[in-house]
Image (cartoon, rainbow, N blue to C red):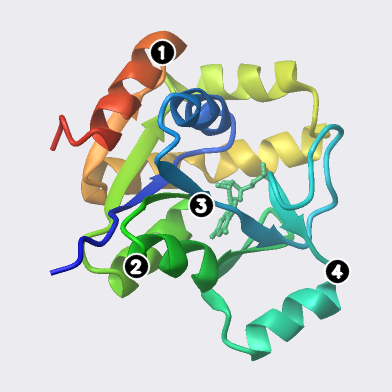
């Protein structure tokens, strides 16, 4: 029987360090395909269309939605984000592992649709640390930081109770090693 790839779903509160960890780990795991999401959010400085996200207008996003192209989608902090079926299914059916980065609700949807998806939660050391990281990042206004940290307690509770793996991002090198180990199938 032909080998199909595994699906790794990474979620966690904004500011927990998901992007940094994912970037590091994928550098050393060229066999893992990163599923680029579509979003209606405007690009931040340095973000590249097709690499970080597919940055779409509301109408383009609606068109994909009508065509049934999303595996899941959510409104997160006022913008729409969605995982494209094509980004996941093409790789998986050709035997490649796929890493999907979504919010916590999106992760639960992926699990309900794809049997065997492994849910990985990136946990900040504390809510205070989360807030301080978001401030240092300097990409979001104060109101946005409050929105992002406001939902974090629920996200953390859900991560602890229903995700398959929880990685505490206290030290980025250690957390990246842990995530790399999970992708290699060494944990769980
Ligand atoms: P950001 O705007 O900071 O890049 O992402 C905001 C949030 O949206 C993060 O929690 C991120 O994980 C989530 N997100 C990114 N892509 C997707 C997606 O395709 N689906 C869902 N449900 N959430 C996503």
User: Any atom of ligand 1 within 8 Å of the CB at mark 3?
Assistant: yes
The mark found on residue 93 in the picture is: 2
Distance (Cα) linking label 4 and label 3:
20 Å
Label 1 vs 2, first from the N-terminus: 2
**Element type where label 3 sits in the image:** loop
Mark nearer the viewer, 3 or 2: 2
The residue nearer to you, when weighing 148 against 138, is: 138
Image quarter where the C terminus lies is: top left
| Horizontal and vertical percent position of residue 37 | 61, 57
The residue that label 3 is drawn on is 103
Label 1 vs 3, first from the N-terminus: 3
Q: Are marks 1 and 2 in contact (CB under 8 Å)?
A: no
Mark nearer the viewer, 4 or 3: 4
Label 1 vs 4, first from the N-terminus: 4
| Horizontal and vertical percent position of residue 128 | 54, 19
The residue that label 1 is drawn on is 170
Quadrant of the rendered image containing residue 148: top right
| Horizontal and vertical percent position of residue 142 | 80, 32
Mark nearer the viewer, 1 or 4: 4
Label 3 vs 2, first from the N-terminus: 2
The residue that label 4 is drawn on is 57
Q: Residue at x 25, y 62 (%)?
A: 4
| Horizontal and vertical percent position of residue 95 | 31, 58
**Element type where label 2 sits in the image:** helix
Label 2 vs 4, first from the N-terminus: 4
């Amino acid at each position: 029987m032909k080998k199909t790839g595994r699906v790794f779903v990474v979620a966690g509160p904004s500011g927990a360090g998901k992007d940094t960890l994912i970037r590091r780990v994928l550098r050393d795991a060229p066999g893992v395909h990163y599923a680029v999401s579509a979003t209606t959010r405007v690009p931040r400085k340095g973000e590249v269309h097709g690499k970080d996200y597919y940055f779409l207008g509301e109408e383009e996003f609606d068109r994909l939605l009508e065509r049934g192209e999303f595996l899941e989608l959510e409104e997160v902090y006022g913008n729409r984000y969605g995982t494209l079926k094509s980004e996941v299914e093409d790789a998986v059916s050709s035997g490649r592992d796929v890493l999907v980065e979504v919010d916590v609700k999106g992760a639960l949807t992926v699990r309900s649709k794809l049997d065997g998806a492994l849910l990985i939660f990136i946990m900040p050391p504390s809510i205070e640390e989360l807030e301080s990281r978001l401030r240092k990042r300097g990409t979001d206004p104060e109101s946005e930081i409050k929105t992002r940290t406001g939902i974090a307690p629920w996200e953390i509770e859900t991560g602890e109770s229903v995700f398959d793996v929880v990685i505490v991002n206290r030290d980025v090198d250690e957390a990246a090693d842990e995530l790399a180990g999970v992708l290699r199938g060494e944990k769980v």
